[in-house]
Image (cartoon, coloured by chain):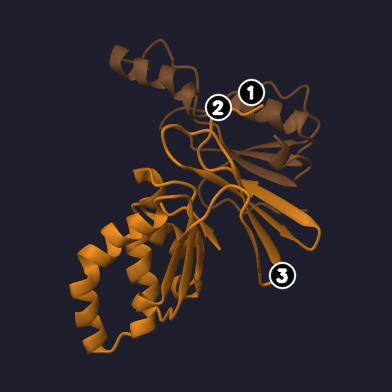
């Protein structure tokens, strides 16, 4: 947390999504374990809020999954990162 | 400065309008396949485009990755390319270093720092860039550290 305190932009791993009900059991099991070594999209926004980060850029998306977050407690900007995005650091 | 080099990085750099030969600094957050499989392609692509030196910085295991994926496998092909006219420093003067959490260095006026993440069982780093009062952190992969 200290490392990201007050930074202008935080590009962060938001890979650990909640698996959908339609997933095959084996795949579902893998995705459930992602929290052990990846952050969830909501973790990322919560960290950005707690560390007073200017903008948080969510990355490391799984194929076919759009991260969903509640950013109501965060005053900064939440960006769902995409390939070739250009983001100002100001 | 490029952070991580997953599969497809050469094509994406070109799509972004970057010159492969101009990339002389790479920071790798960790050695998982989806963060480094484009690295050998970038070693070759940048060299083909005229790069004469490169610094590669990452956690414990970075030097070993370079040794295994680039030096061990491509040395013979590199010597052939050097005979063909490629610059020797472009392949030989790649300075790869393993750095710990807390490491920092000034690079062309930009402060680069390595920070902690949680990505077991890998050794992994986040990188912070601070330039003229503005800063950016790229975490690589990490669980939530609170």
- Say few, some or many: other residues with alpha carbon within 10 Å of mark 3 (under 14 / 14 to 19 / 20 or more): few
Task: Depth check: give the residue in front, A2 or B60.
Answer: B60
Location of the C terminus of chain B by quadrant is top right
Q: Is residue B75 left or right of residue B4?
A: left
Q: Position of residue A6 (x, y in %)?
A: 79, 42
Q: Report in which chain the residue with disc 3 lies.
A: B
Chain B rendering hue: orange
Q: CA distance from mark 2 to mark 3?
A: 36 Å
Task: Depth check: give the residue in front, A59 or B91.
Answer: B91
Task: Depth check: give the residue in front, A49 or B60.
Answer: B60
Colour brown belongs to chain = A
Q: Position of residue A50 (x, y in %)?
A: 76, 28
Q: Residue drawn at (36%, 15%), measured in percent from left and top?
A: A29
Residue B18 shows in this picture: no
Q: Which residue is mark 2?
A: A67
Q: Which residue is mark 1?
A: A69
Q: CA distance from mark 1 to mark 2?
A: 7 Å
Q: Secondary structure at mark 2?
A: loop
Q: Report in which chain the residue with disc 2 lies.
A: A
Q: Secondary structure at mark 1?
A: loop
State whether residue B100 is above or below residue A68.
below
Q: Which residue is mark 3?
A: B109
Q: CA distance from mark 3 to mark 1?
A: 36 Å
Q: Position of residue B59 (x, y in %)?
A: 48, 50
Q: Residue drawn at (45%, 42%), measured in percent from left and top?
A: B123
Q: Residue drawn at (45%, 77%), measured in percent from left and top?
A: B53
Q: In the image, which is nearer the foreground, mark 3 or mark 1? A: 3
Q: Are marks 2 and 3 in contact (CB under 8 Å)?
A: no
């Amino acid at each position: 947390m200290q490392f990201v305190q007050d930074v202008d932009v935080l590009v962060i791993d938001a890979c650990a999504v909640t698996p959908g009900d339609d997933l095959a059991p084996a795949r579902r099991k893998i995705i459930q374990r992602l929290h052990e070594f990846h952050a969830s999209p909501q973790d990322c926004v919560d960290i950005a809020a707690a560390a007073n980060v200017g903008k948080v850029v969510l990355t490391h998306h799984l194929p076919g999954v759009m991260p969903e977050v509640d950013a109501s407690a965060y005053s900064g900007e939440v960006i769902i990162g995409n390939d070739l995005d250009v983001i100002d650091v100001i | 400065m490029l952070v991580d080099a997953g599969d497809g990085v050469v094509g994406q750099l070109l799509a972004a309008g970057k010159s492969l030969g101009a990339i002389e600094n790479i920071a790798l957050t960790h050695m998982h396949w989806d963060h480094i499989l484009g690295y050998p392609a970038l070693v070759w692509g940048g060299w083909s485009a005229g790069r004469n030196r490169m610094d590669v910085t990452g956690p414990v295991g970075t030097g070993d990755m370079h040794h295994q994926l680039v030096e061990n496998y491509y040395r013979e092909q590199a010597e052939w390319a050097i005979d063909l006219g490629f610059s020797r420093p472009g392949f030989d003067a790649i300075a790869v270093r393993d750095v710990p959490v807390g490491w920092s260095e000034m690079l062309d006026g930009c402060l680069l720092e390595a920070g902690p993440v949680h990505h077991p069982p890998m050794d992994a780093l986040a990188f912070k860039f601070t330039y003229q009062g503005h800063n950016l952190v790229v975490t690589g992969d990490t669980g939530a550290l609170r």
